[in-house]
Image (spheres, rainbow, N blue to C red):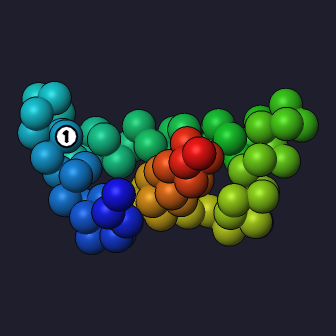
Amino acid sequence: MTRLRKREIKKALKTGAKAGGMSLVDIRTNIETTIDEAMNSTDPEVHENFKKYFGNKRPTPEEYIYIITKKTVKGLKV
């Protein structure tokens, strides 16, 4: 399986936005909302997982998608 690069993520976001009839700004805003919810979660498990992947750093939407995708693909390998 091909590894995803950050620039490929950016291109995929643009393509997905166009396909979904949304603007790239809308897609980025939705991802940023997801990031904010995870960072500010009162659920210890959610907060712990976020810190495990990103530490105390707030990722960009591209970094978030890249890391989550990378971790998910890695977890799916048998």
Report which quarter residue 1 is drawn in: bottom left
- The residue nearer to you, when weighing 36 against 19, is 19
- The residue nearer to you, when weighing 70 against 78, is 78
| Residue wearing tag 1 | 16
Residue sticking out furthest to the right:
44
Residue 66 left/right relative to 48: left
The reply to whether residue 50 is in sight is yes
- The residue nearer to you, when weighing 30 against 54, is 54
Indicate the secondary structure of the residue bearing disc 1: helix
The reply to whether residue 64 is in sight is no
Residue sticking out furthest to the front:
78
**Quick check: 48 above or below 70?**
above
Amino acid on which disc 1 is placed: Gly
How far from the left and from the top, in percent, is residue 38? Answer: 68, 41
Residue at point 40%, 60% (across, down): 62
Residue 13 left/right relative to 53: left
How far from the left and from the top, in percent, is residue 57? Answer: 68, 68
Residue at point 84%, 48% (across, down): 48
Figure quadrant of the C terminus:
top right
Residue at point 16%, 29% (across, down): 20
Residue 57 left/right relative to 26: right
Residue at point 28%, 39% (across, down): 26
How far from the left and from the top, in percent, is residue 5? Answer: 34, 70
Q: What is the crowding at mark 1: few (fewer than 14 residues within 10 Å), some, or many (at least 20)? A: some
